[in-house]
């Protein structure tokens, strides 16, 4: 899900202020597994899509935190795994909220490892910011193809971590 909201910003601590892609925690304690490898992979996705980023913030939160954002800014009263707020399109500047609770629940429901679903959601949010939609069946099919394409180029270290969990 993507929406534009220029005044909406996270007030969390950055991992590395020099990165154009940063990870934050909102109301939960969450450690991004293999953050350097994930950042390299996400940057490779941007490069493959011929896009550049000024500042992309991934904010990890609980179901309730994201539900509040969904209600307040999108007027939707349901849980979701991800919401992307685009601030600028070129170069990309955005905040992407991810409910770790929802990612865990979805992974269990569809029978995949948490890290596989986590990586899919990371890519999904970035693909929205690159202009891909998923409202129609055709758009959703293309989004899944793109997600799978980028999941396939993950570094071996990320794939090995999945197999261990």
Image (cartoon, grey):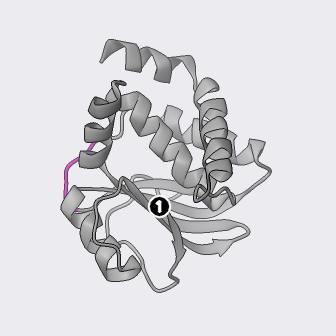
The answer to whether residue 161 is above or below residue 51 is above
Which quadrant of the figure has residue 155?
top right
Percent position of residue 69, x then y? 31, 73
Task: Residue at 30%, 18% (x, y): give it.
Answer: 165
Task: Specify the farthest residue to the right.
Answer: 50
Towards the viewer: 32 or 129: 129
From the image, tell me which residue sits under label 1: 57
Q: Secondary structure at mark 1?
A: strand
Task: Residue at 55%, 17% (x, y): give it.
Answer: 156
Task: Residue at 19%, 63% (x, y): give it.
Answer: 64
Percent position of residue 34, x then y? 42, 31
Which quadrant of the figure has residue 60?
bottom left
Q: Main secondary structure of the magenta part?
A: loop
* Number of marks present in the image shown: 1
Horizontally, is 14 left or right of 120 in the view? left
Percent position of residue 61, x then y? 27, 57
Towards the viewer: 44 or 65: 65
The answer to whether residue 93 is above or below residue 24 is below
Horizontally, is 14 left or right of 26 in the view? right
Q: Is residue 43 visible?
A: no
Task: Residue at 54%, 48% (x, y): give it.
Answer: 124
- Looking at the rendering, the stretch of residues picked out in magenta corresponds to 27-31
Towards the viewer: 159 or 63: 63
Residue 28 painted magenta: yes
């Amino acid at each position: 899900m993507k929406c534009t909201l220029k005044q909406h910003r996270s007030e969390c601590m950055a991992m590395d202020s020099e990165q154009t892609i940063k990870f934050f925690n909102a109301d939960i304690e969450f450690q991004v597994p293999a953050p350097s490898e994930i950042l390299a992979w996400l940057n490779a996705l941007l490069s493959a899509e011929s896009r550049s980023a000024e500042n992309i913030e991934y904010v990890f939160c609980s179901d309730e935190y994201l539900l509040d954002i969904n209600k307040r800014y999108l007027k939707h009263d349901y849980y979701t795994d991800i919401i992307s707020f685009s601030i600028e399109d070129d170069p990309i500047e955005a905040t992407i909220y991810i409910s770790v609770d929802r990612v865990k629940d979805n992974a269990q429901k569809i029978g995949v490892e948490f890290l596989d679903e986590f990586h899919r959601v990371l890519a999904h949010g970035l693909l929205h910011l690159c202009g891909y939609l998923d409202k129609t069946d055709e758009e959703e099919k293309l989004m899944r193809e793109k997600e799978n394409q980028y999941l396939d180029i993950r570094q071996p270290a990320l794939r090995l971590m999945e197999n261990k969990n």
